[in-house]
Image: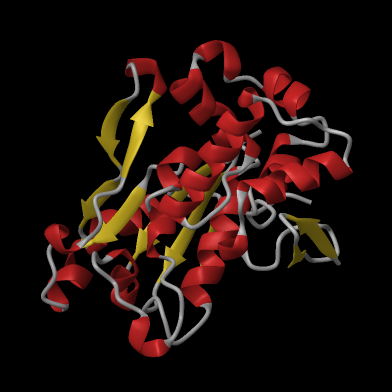
């Protein structure tokens, strides 16, 4: 599979995750979101950017539980709950947000 | 009911798949709300050393992942004192693994517990499930 963004074609796996995460650009996230009828707001970008920083530091995509806890600490307690994250990413904050962020599927996520 | 899981790590980080497999199982298992401990003995202590450079073997280093264990509530990491000494290592040669205590305003606490061989055997006695890698 592949996704078009920025006039370029990016290769993805069968579930739509970017094959080469070094190729990621913000436009890729926008295009992936558009394909799922989702318009990215600043709140979405906060999560996407957080995930990319986490991956950069620890080389893994965090489990949802870890993401929720970290978001609460970094972005405020009112955002550190699964209701908030699921409203932003209805297909699952782990799966959907990691995909937009160009990361692999979180370890332990089915 | 939560069970006490102990993962024993015995091998050097690269050259075999054991260290990475153990790490993945630990991260997956941590999602199930069990009481998780890790032990590093023998060459396994090399898994926690600082400044690993994997360039020469053309493999990505997974040593940053150990730093994330605290986020997964994996904060009982036993390192056997004799194994370190036999290899001329001290605690300072290992990565500084910490976890944040939410109940104490995210205070950072050490995850690594340096234990003697006999202390570790008591810890192992106390576990429900012991997995060896």
Vertical relation: A59 (above or below) A19: above
Q: Which of these two is toward me, A51 or A108? A: A51
Q: Residue furthest front?
A: A7
Pinpoint residue A83: horizontal percent, then vertical percent.
Answer: 72, 18
Q: Is residue B60 left or right of residue A32?
A: left
Q: Which of these two is toward me, B48 or A53? A: A53
Residue displayed at 27% across by 59% down: B79
Q: Is residue B70 left or right of residue B83?
A: right
Residue displayed at 69% across by 40% down: A97
Residue B56: name its quadrant.
bottom left
Q: Which of these two is toward me, B116 or B102? A: B102
Residue displayed at 33% across by 16% down: B105
- Quarter holding the N terminus of chain B is top right
Residue B110: name its quadrant.
top left
Q: Is residue B96 left or right of residue A29?
A: left
Residue B125 visible here: no
Colour scheme in the image?
secondary structure
Vertical relation: A20 (above or below) A96: below
Pinpoint residue A70: horizontal percent, then vertical percent.
Answer: 49, 30
Pinpoint residue B51: horizontal percent, then vertical percent.
Answer: 24, 68
Q: Is residue B83 left or right of residue A4?
A: left
Residue A82: name its quadrant.
top right
Vertical relation: B120 (above or below) B82: above
Pinpoint residue A53: horizontal percent, then vertical percent.
Answer: 47, 45
Q: How many marks?
A: 0
Residue A26 visible here: yes
């Amino acid at each position: 599979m592949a996704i078009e963004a920025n006039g370029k074609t990016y290769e993805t796996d069968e579930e739509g995750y970017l094959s080469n995460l070094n190729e990621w650009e913000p436009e890729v996230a926008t295009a992936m979101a558009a394909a799922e009828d989702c318009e990215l707001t600043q709140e979405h970008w906060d999560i996407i950017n957080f995930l990319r920083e986490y991956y950069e530091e620890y080389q893994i995509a965090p489990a949802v539980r870890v993401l929720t806890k970290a978001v609460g600490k970094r972005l405020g307690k009112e955002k550190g709950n699964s209701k908030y994250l699921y409203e932003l990413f209805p297909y699952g904050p782990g799966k959907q947000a990691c995909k937009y962020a160009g990361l692999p599927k979180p370890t332990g996520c089915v | 009911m939560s069970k006490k899981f102990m993962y024993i790590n015995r091998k050097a980080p690269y050259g075999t798949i054991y260290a990475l497999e153990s790490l993945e199982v630990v991260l997956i298992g941590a999602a199930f709300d069990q009481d998780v401990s890790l032990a590093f003995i023998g060459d396994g202590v090399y898994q926690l050393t600082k400044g690993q450079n994997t360039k020469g073997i053309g493999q990505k280093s997974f040593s940053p992942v150990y730093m994330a264990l605290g986020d997964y509530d994996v904060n009982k990491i036993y390192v056997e004192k004799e194994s370190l000494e036999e290899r001329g290592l001290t605690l300072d040669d290992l990565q500084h693994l910490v976890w944040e205590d939410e109940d104490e305003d995210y205070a950072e606490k050490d995850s690594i517990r340096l234990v003697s061989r006999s202390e570790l055997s008591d810890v192992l006695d106390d576990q429900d499930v012991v997995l060896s890698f």
